[in-house]
Amino acid sequence: MVDASELLRRVEAFLADHDPGTTDRLDFLHARFDAGLAWVAYPEGLGGLGAPRSLQRVVDEAFARAGAPTNRPESIGIGLGMAAPTILRFGTPEQQRRWLRPLWTGEEVWCQLFSEPGAGSDLAGLGTRAVPEDRDGERVWIVTGQKVWTSMAHRARWAILLTRTDPDLPKHQGITYFVCEMTDPGVQVRPLRQITGEAEFNEVFLDGAQIPDVHRLGDVGDGWRVAQGTLMNERVAIGGSVAIDREQGPIGVLTRLWRDRAELRRPGLHGELMTSWVQAEAVRLTSDLFRQQLATGHPGPEGASIKLAFAKLNQEVSSLVLEVLGEEGLSYGDYEMRRPERVDLFGPSPGYNYLRARGNSIEGGTSEILLNIIAERVLGLPQEPRVDKDVPWKDLAK
């Protein structure tokens, strides 16, 4: 197995052949992927070397010291955290070769077409239909429906998509998972303006969008199982976005304010700050552990706990920052309509972060749903009664 010293030797040899100062950015990233130095835990030929996930940081830091270009993960997080591990686990070799390289380099942005106006927390109730047609001897799926709360759909080339392919089966069955090309004429993206003023989210209308069968992930009707893999990766990815360096992220803003601006210190707030600091440390260390699950493509339901903790922590810390700042914290800037280039869970200002954090307990699975997952799948507690579980989807109240 490749160890840290071997990885550093490979990075050194790679940099000797690819000077970061003179090599074109994309050419550099292509070569890094082909050398297995992209995500080192992935298989050879798919950007990795089959190395332990814990060694990824060794490689990343070595490239950073050399001033090497990055793949800008802040703008392609959905692809890296959700699409890639799903493709690695369920994709065919052809699909893996086609999608993983441009996904990692950032040449192709991905989004997630899961939630619907009538299927949010109850995602299995989704109604977007995919109907097969035979065209010139090849199967094509015609997709009609609406998706909502789609981050970065306005920039995406590809989308991971859940559809209903058999309405006669119960809702958790008869679901099929596809990769949808967002440039298809049957795909329309409309902005959803948020409380922050910008439109990071979108609603997506699918009106006769055509998807070739070769863009299906997993078997027909097995989409719910594939989706569970994606969702568990999503929760670990969101929870794992907590910085792995101490006092980075929102808690860093809070502690710097307290240290640098003595005039803001007021009785009673110090205890709250210390409580938040301890919680942030616990979440940071735990998230670092869960991040190691991402490379395997098989994170467990335990990942729901770190996403749940992240949402609670970010909301509490962002609120405490405003409390420390007082009137100053209410200054926001403007609410100009913007279409951001990346997903920003923390934000450029305390006011923005406070507003954006309200969505943390909804995105990636609502906190209530995650509590059920932890109770049932981690702690082994009895399931809540579900009277619609075995009812054909077409017979459910809509």
Image: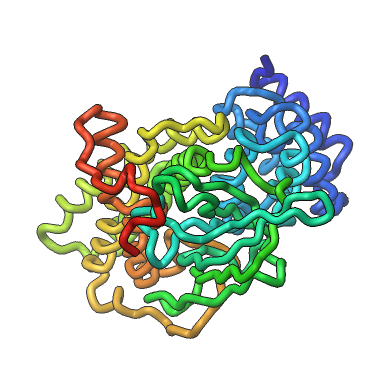
Image quadrant where residue 85 sits: top right
Q: Position of residue 199 (x, y in %)?
A: 50, 75
The residue located at (43%, 33%) in the rendering is 290
Query: Residue 349 is drawn in which quadrant?
Result: bottom left
Q: Position of residue 393 (x, y in %)?
A: 40, 52
Reply above or below: 395 against 64.
Answer: below
Image spot of residue 282 (x, y percent): 31, 37
Quadrant for the N terminus in the image: top right
In this image, 364 relative to 38: left or right?
left
Question: Is residue 346 in view from this perspective?
Answer: yes
Find residue 316 and report its horizontal and vertical position in percent: 25, 57
Do we see residue 251 in this rendering? no
Q: Is residue 48 above or below residue 207?
A: above
Res 384 quadrant in image: top left
Q: Is residue 363 above or below residue 281?
A: below
Left or right for 154, reference 260: right
Q: Is residue 12 above or below residue 277?
A: above
Q: What residue is at 64 percent from the left and 23 percent from the top?
A: 51
Q: From the viewer's side, name the closer residue of 382 and 133.
A: 133
Left/right of residue 226 with respect to residue 213 in the rendered view = left
